[in-house]
Image (cartoon, helix red, strand yellow):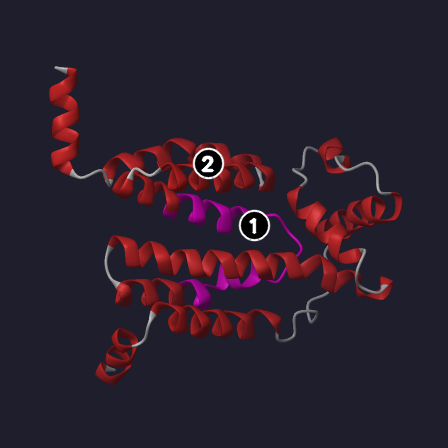
Amino acid sequence: MMSIWKWVHARKEPVLLIVLGLTFLLTRVINLLLLPLFTDESIYIYWAKVIASTHAQWFISLTDGKPPLLIWMISFLLSIFPSDWYLLAGRLPSVAMGLIGCLATFKTGELLFSKRAGVISAILYIMSPMLLFYDRMALFDSSLTAMLITSVYFALRTGKTRKLRDGLLWWFFLGLAFLSKPTALVFLPLTVFAAFMTIPFKDTKKQLAKLG
């Protein structure tokens, strides 16, 4: 075990990201089409096929109160893949979103604690049965999770660095979370709280002194 952590500390961050990304993809891509098509998946893929074939009705999912981000990604793949690859086109966006969520989990753990904590967090993400299920299905949950984790990461960075770029990325990924599932609204105040909690205490004290 000690040799593993020595290897982790010796490796540069891009190497760790590649290793974690490949490990994640192995767990998600192998037998991706093994599970049968679920009812909800068939509905979402049908909506995406309507968009891909007509190049219109981009907001067809709103007729059922569903956000359009996942439908747009599936429709893009349907326009590239052969017609009988519809299930693969439906599930690949969830795999891609899960990969983003895994890497964002590593970055968040590294930002808050250490590189070792980031690796452990990413491994737990990969091994989570619930995430393993949703990352292999054409459902909205994987994209919601990935966008929320990424927005939390940039919210934490915004509190630490107070750079406009981090703040814009925070709200950009939070907006994508809203386009993934409406329940992302619940997490809006939590990301704001996370940003304020990471502001250095001495800077907070100065700001309060100015207000006084």
Disc number placed over residue 30 in the picture, else none: none
Please tell me whether mark 2 or mark 1 is closer to you in this view. Answer: 2
- 104, 166: nearer the viewer: 166
* Residue 203 locus on image (x, y percent): 16, 33
Q: Which mark is residue 171?
A: 2
Quarter of the image for the N terminus: give it.
Answer: bottom left
Q: On the image, numbered disc 1 is attached to which residue?
A: 143
> Residue, x 28% and y 80% (percent of image)?
7
Task: Name which of mark 2 and mark 1 comes first in the sequence.
Answer: 1
Q: Residue furthest right?
A: 54
Q: Quadrant of residue 199?
A: top left
Image x and y of residue 185, in percent: 49, 32
Q: Secondary structure at mark 1?
A: helix
Residue 94 image position (x, y, % from top left):
61, 57
Task: Give the extent of the magenta segment.
Answer: 125-153
Residue 101 sits inside the magenta stretch:
no
Q: Label 1 is placed on what type of residue? A: Ser
Predominant secondary structure in magenta?
A: helix
Q: Residue at x 43, y 49 (%)?
A: 149
The kind of residue on which mark 2 rests is: Trp
Q: Residue at x 17, y 25 (%)?
A: 207
Q: Quadrant of the C terminus?
A: top left
Instruction: Judge left or right: residue 51 versus residue 69.
Output: right
184 w.r.t. 13: above or below: above
Where residue 145 appears, as percent x and y from the top left, is 49, 49
Q: Tag 2's secondary structure?
A: helix
Q: Is residue 185 left or right of residue 93?
A: left
Nearest the viewer among 189 and 205 is: 205
Asked if 193 appears above or below 76 in the picture, the reply is: above
As measured in the structure, the alpha-carbon distance from the residue carrying label 2 to the one carrying label 1 is 16 Å
